[in-house]
Amino acid sequence: MQKPPPKPTDATEMVANALSLAIHEHRLAPGTKLGEDEIGDVYSVSRTVVRAALQSLAHVQLVEIQRHKGAFVAHPSPREAREVFEARALLEPRTARSAATRATGRDINILRQHVTEEHAAMADGDNGRAVNLSGLFHIEIARIADQETIGRFIETLIARSSLIIALYWRRESALCESHAHHALVQAIADADEQNAEDLMRSHLVDLNSALDLRERPVQTRSLRELLQQPAR
Amino acid sequence: MQKPPPKPTDATEMVANALSLAIHEHRLAPGTKLGEDEIGDVYSVSRTVVRAALQSLAHVQLVEIQRHKGAFVAHPSPREAREVFEARALLEPRTARSAATRATGRDINILRQHVTEEHAAMADGDNGRAVNLSGLFHIEIARIADQETIGRFIETLIARSSLIIALYWRRESALCESHAHHALVQAIADADEQNAEDLMRSHLVDLNSALDLRERPVQTRSLRELLQQPAR
DNA sequence: TCTGTCGGAATTGTATACAACATTGTGTTC
DNA sequence: GAACACAATGTTGTATACAATTCCGACAGA
């Protein structure tokens, strides 16, 4: 293993990542109150750090901060959900095309690895993990496309998509993204730009049509029992 | 004037806005060190608030925070500059089209007002203000398009564009955005979607071609004398 | 003069203390 | 019994104190 730098890791970032993962894996449901003291206890850091982490997550709209009220896991409205997928439709097909142009053999391997893991998570019935991995797949494509700026946008869209799926997914609809992803990888591996772009576009359409965008009530839950992440 | 709520204004937000404005108006040059104590003194707030504001600006990449080093006004590389304009080219034409579809008479008035102010700023030779107003024009179009999500992306792109202009603008190139903006307003007022989209696209191309994207050295400057904003 | 090391000063990272505000429960009044 | 007022409690907003790290200049040696 290669870890030349010991670990200049940042407490704020660690907390933000832990919370982000918990949200992505649907262990923290939309609407959950995120008390500062509570989180500070769980991760053994001060409120200063927790606040910074929460603000960071608020910026990517994973949590919503209400002045004097606190932070809550974001609860995207149907309208926001629509907007997120419109934005993805605008950004991701082009990005997939770029990825098809630039992908190296190593990139392809990474993508295949992702698809395999997704498949495994699905087989395990671990839906949270599957959703998270699926998101990472899209982010990986943006990385391959070598578009830092657009890639960041896509990251925030993926994050919010995870919440949207938690809220609006039709349970009767089969969540078999791995097929679409597999086809995408093939197109990228073949450097078939047009195909990659088209596949991504239709993949997003499919995703969108598996949603049932009607209002959902905001339900608040407790928190502590949902964070078993072993406090760093 | 209508101000029913007294002013639930947030100290962090005020500092962030003040700094943001200073950067947009090119009173703070790229690379400038933003010391926490220093800013705290200027605006009479504690470092806690300043830190939150700086992190907020770091999220939109107006400032760059280096661990244990501090915050600096961002200094976009030529590569980042290219990416920013690529992203704008991807997002803004479509947004202009939507704006043409949805704009009301009131919206048109607001846009015309913007163009007039830009013109005035240019006439005064106040370039900083002109750049800032020009950015606000683009943001206003996103607002009219009623695309909150994409609008936010555009906001961050505009912000970075301001830095890019500060760094890479060819001084010999005439900065007459108000003409392009005027034509755009007309297309939007006419609800001519295709024209609005095309005009926006070519406007961005023009902007881009007025840049000289070669490396610039990072020059650090002092700070205090550049912030005459009367400390709230 | 150049180089490298050491120590003090300055700055940032984190924790804690206090102030401001919101919420909730209780008691009083009608 | 319902509605309001108000106090008690808890949570967030801000300031300050302390720890950790970096920066910068002095100084010694080559």
Image: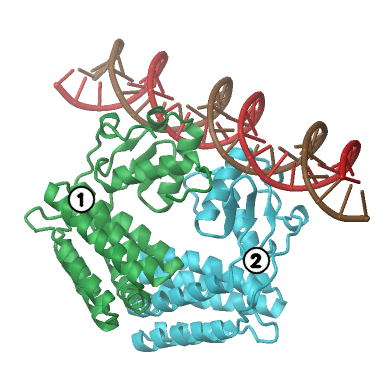
Chain colours: A cyan, B green, C red, D brown
Residue A79, quarter of the rendered image = bottom right
Chain of the residue under the numbered disc 1 shown in the image: B
Residue A148, quarter of the rendered image = bottom left
Q: Residue furthest left?
A: B172
Residue type at mark 2 is Glu
Residue B176 visible in the displayed image: yes
In this rendering, would C2 be left or right of B80? left
The crowd level at tag 2 (other Cα within 10 Å; few <14, some 14-19, many 20+) is: many
Query: Residue A25 got which mark?
Result: 2
The percent position of residue B20, horizontal first and vertical second, equals 35, 46
Q: Secondary structure at mark 1?
A: helix
Q: Secondary structure at mark 2?
A: loop
Q: CA distance from mark 1 to mark 2?
A: 42 Å
**Badge 1 and badge 2 both on one subunit:** no
> At 36% across and 41% down in the image, what residue appears?
B18
The residue under label 1 is B167
The percent position of residue B141, horizontal first and vertical second, equals 33, 67
Residue type at mark 1 is Leu
- Give the answer, above or below, for where A65 lies relative to D16: below
Count of number-bearing discs: 2
Query: Residue B55 got which mark?
Result: none
- Give the answer, above or below, for where B2 lies relative to A193: above
> At 37% across and 52% down in the image, what residue appears?
B61
The percent position of residue A83, horizontal first and vertical second, equals 48, 73
The percent position of residue A173, horizontal first and vertical second, equals 66, 86
Residue B105, quarter of the rendered image = bottom left
Residue B66 visible in the displayed image: no
Q: In this orientation, which residue lies closer to the viewer: A62 or C1?
A: A62
